[in-house]
Image (spheres, rainbow, N blue to C red):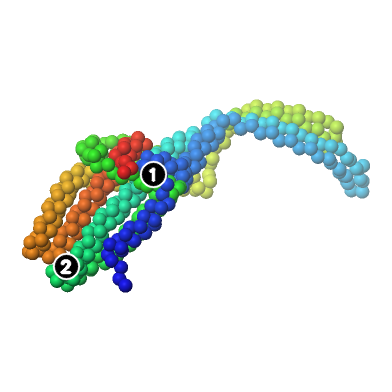
Amino acid sequence: MRRTARHVVAVVGVALGVTCFAPAVGATSLSQAYDLARQNDRQWRQAQARLRDVQELLPLARGQLLPQVSLSASKSHIQQEQTTGDRTSPQQSYPSDSQVLSVRQPVFRARQFRAVEQAQAQLEQGVQQLRAEEQQLAVRVVGSYLDALLAQDRRRLMDGQLALVSNRLAAAQAGLRAGQGTRNDVDDARAELDRIRAQSIQIDQAIQVSRRQVELLIGTQPGALDRLDLERFDPLRLQAPALDAAVDAALRDNPQVLAAQQEVRSASSALAQAEANHLPTLDLVAQVGKSTGENTFFASTSTRSASLGLQFSLPLYAGGTISAQARQAAARLEQATEAFEQVSNKVRIDLQTEHNAVMQGRVLIEALKTSVASAQEALKSSRRGQEAGVRSLLDVLRSENLLFQAELDLAQARYTYLAAWLKLQGLMGALKPDVVARLSALFGSR
C-alpha cells in the first residue's frame, strides 16, 4: 500500500532532524568557532611551533660572537718501561692528571656578524609567516562556517519546496479522483517530487561534510550554527577602501609580502657571509692549566701555565669552495628577489579580485533581492492562472523552482560577500581577531 505524500514528508523531516541536528548540543557562534580553532587547529599549532623553532636562530647566531669557555680535565695512571739496547730501566708507575681552562673571545669575525643579521631577518620572517597563518585560520574558519550555513539554508529551502510539491501532488491526485484534474498534473508533480528527494540526499551529504570541516578546525563537534541576522546585515556597513589605498595597505602590511621581503634580506645576509669567508679572523685567547706527572723523568713534578694572546687566521686557498659558496648564495638571493616580486604581484591580483567581489557583491545582493521579489510575483501569477485555467500545474512548479533558486542565489551572494570582505581584510594585513568578532555580531541563533 502506497504511503501518502504528507506521510512521506513527515518521515523525511524527522529523519533529517535526527541525522543533521541530533548530535548538536547548544549553539556555536562564529567567534566561539574561531576561538576553538585557535586552540585546537593542527595547522595553526604547527605554525606556532615553527615560530618557536625560528626564535632560537638569533641566540644561536649571537652565541658565536660571545666568549667560548671550555674546561678539560684528565686523570690517568701510567706504567712504563724503557729499553735501550740491552739495558732496561726500572718500571715506572705513577699518576698523571691535568686541568686546562681556556677562553676564546671573537674580536673580528665578519661571517658571524652577518649570521646575526640573517637570524634577525629569519626571525622577522617567521613572525610574518605566523601572522599569515593566523589570517588564513580566520579565512578557513569563516569559510567553513559559511559553507555549513549555506548547506543548511539549502536544506530549509528544499524542505519548503518539498512540502509545497507534496501538497501539489496530493491536490492533483484528489482532483484526478474527482474528475476535475488531469493525469499530466499528477505525473508532473510526482516527477518534481522525486527530483527534490534526490537533491535532498545530496544536500544532506553536503551538510555532513561542511559540519565535519568545521569540526576538524575547532577540534570538537559543533552545536547549532548561528544564522545570519538579516536585520543586522548591511553590506554598506562593511567598509572597503578604494582600490589604490587597499593596494598600498597590502604592500605595506600584508604578512606574505613582508615575509618574502625578509627572505630577500636573509638571502642578502647569506651572500655577505659567503663572501666574508675570504676575510681573516681575529680572536682573543686566554688559557690557564695545571698538570702533574707529565714528565717521564720527573714524574712527581707539577706544572702551571698561563697564556694570553691574539690568534689571527687568514684563509689562502680552499680549492675554490669559497667562491662556489658565494656564487650559490648569489643565485639564492636572485631567487628570493624574484619570489618577492611574484608574491607582491599575486597579492595585487588577489586583492583586486576580492575588492571587485566586495564592490560588485553589494550590487549583486540588491539585484537578487529584486529577483526574489519578481519570482514571488511570478509565482502568484502562476497560481492565479492555474485557478483561472490558463496555467498548468507544471507552470506553477516552474515558478516555485525559480523562486527557490532566486532565494538560494541571494543567500549564497550574502555569504560570498562576507567571505570576500574578510579575505580583503587579510590581504591588506588588517585581519585581526576583532574583525572576526565584528562578523560574528551579524549572526544570531534563531
User: Between 128 and 442, which is closer to the camera in this rendering?
Assistant: 442
The residue type indicated by label 1 comes to Ala
- Residue at the farthest front position: 178
Local crowd size for mark 1, using a 10 Å CA cut-off: few (<14), some (14–19), many (≥20): some
Q: Where 170 sits versus 151, above or below?
A: below
**Residue in view at x 37 percent, y 42 percent:** 29
User: How far apart in space, not on screen, are marks 2 and 1 (Cα)?
Assistant: 45 Å
User: Between 199 and 85, which is closer to the camera in this rendering?
Assistant: 199
Mark 2, mark 1: which one is toward the viewer? 2
Can residue 244 be seen?
no
Residue 271: which quarter of the image? top left
User: Between 268 and 425, which is closer to the camera in this rendering?
Assistant: 425
Local crowd size for mark 2, using a 10 Å CA cut-off: few (<14), some (14–19), many (≥20): some
Instruction: Using the image, tell me which numbered label, if any, was put on residue 224.
Output: none
Q: Residue 35: x, y in percent? A: 41, 40
Residue labelled with disc 2: 175
